Image (cartoon, helix red, strand yellow):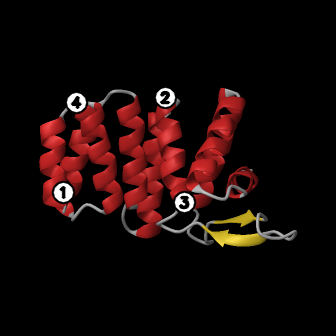
Amino acid sequence: GSRLWLAVVLHSSSPNAMAVRMGEVFSQSTPDSLHVSLSQLLDEISNPSRSFIAFDSSSSSNAKPVLLSEASDVWAIIIRLAIQAGLHDFAEQLRTSLRRVFGRIPAKAWAGTMEGLTELGKFDEVQAIWDTIRATEQPSAEVYRAYLSSAFTEGRWEHAMDVFDAFR
């Protein structure tokens, strides 16, 4: 199930190690098994009767529960990898589920969305997300970083520097 799937990922000691492990999970899964795991994850997140908890046994021999908070890097990594794998519907469903759970889409989830779209060369979609976020709230540092990275990747150097100057 999704808890076991995420428990494997949470053994990682850093976001970069987590991203590598998640990438391995995505690349080693068949489309059907990945769809089942991601569907289970959505079902679990969408269930209002329980907190979303995975188990991390990286710090001791006994597994301990870990609440996956709004600030968790897991959301950005899952969404980025889903977008890269062409699972845009899943990424949208996950953002919607996170909005229900946390009352808004977490900044790291938006950053993961922007990163995935950047890697696919879809700067126009990144720009639309940026504009939407800016219209409703002050973007977080994670969102600024993802947007600036996308602008630089797209070769929009002057625009990126203007945005960076405004951020400072």
The answer to whether residue 126 is left or right of residue 111 is left
SS for dot 2: loop
- Calculate the distance from the C-alpha at mark 4 to the C-alpha at mark 3: 39 Å
Which residue: 57% across, 60% down? Answer: 45
Question: On screen, 63 above or below 163?
Answer: below
Task: Measuring from the top left, give residue 110's x and y in whole percent.
Answer: 37, 52
Task: Measuring from the top left, give residue 128's x and y in whole percent.
Answer: 22, 42
Which residue: 40% across, 61% down? Answer: 106
**Camera-side residue of 2 and 15:** 15
Question: On screen, 67 above or below 144?
Answer: below
Specify which label sits upstream in the sequence, 4 or 1.
1
Marks 4, 3: nearer the viewer: 4
Label 3 neighbour load within 10 Å: few <14, some 14-19, many 20+: many
The answer to whether residue 78 is left or right of residue 165 is right
Specify which label sits upstream in the sequence, 3 or 2.
3
SS for dot 1: helix
Specify which label sits upstream in the sequence, 2 or 1.
2
Mark 2 lies on residue: 86
**Camera-side residue of 156 and 120:** 156
- Calculate the distance from the C-alpha at mark 2 to the C-alpha at mark 4: 24 Å
Mark 4 lies on residue: 155
Give the number of the disc on residue 25.
none
Marks 2, 4: nearer the viewer: 4
Specify which label sits upstream in the sequence, 1 or 3.
3
Mark 3 lies on residue: 46
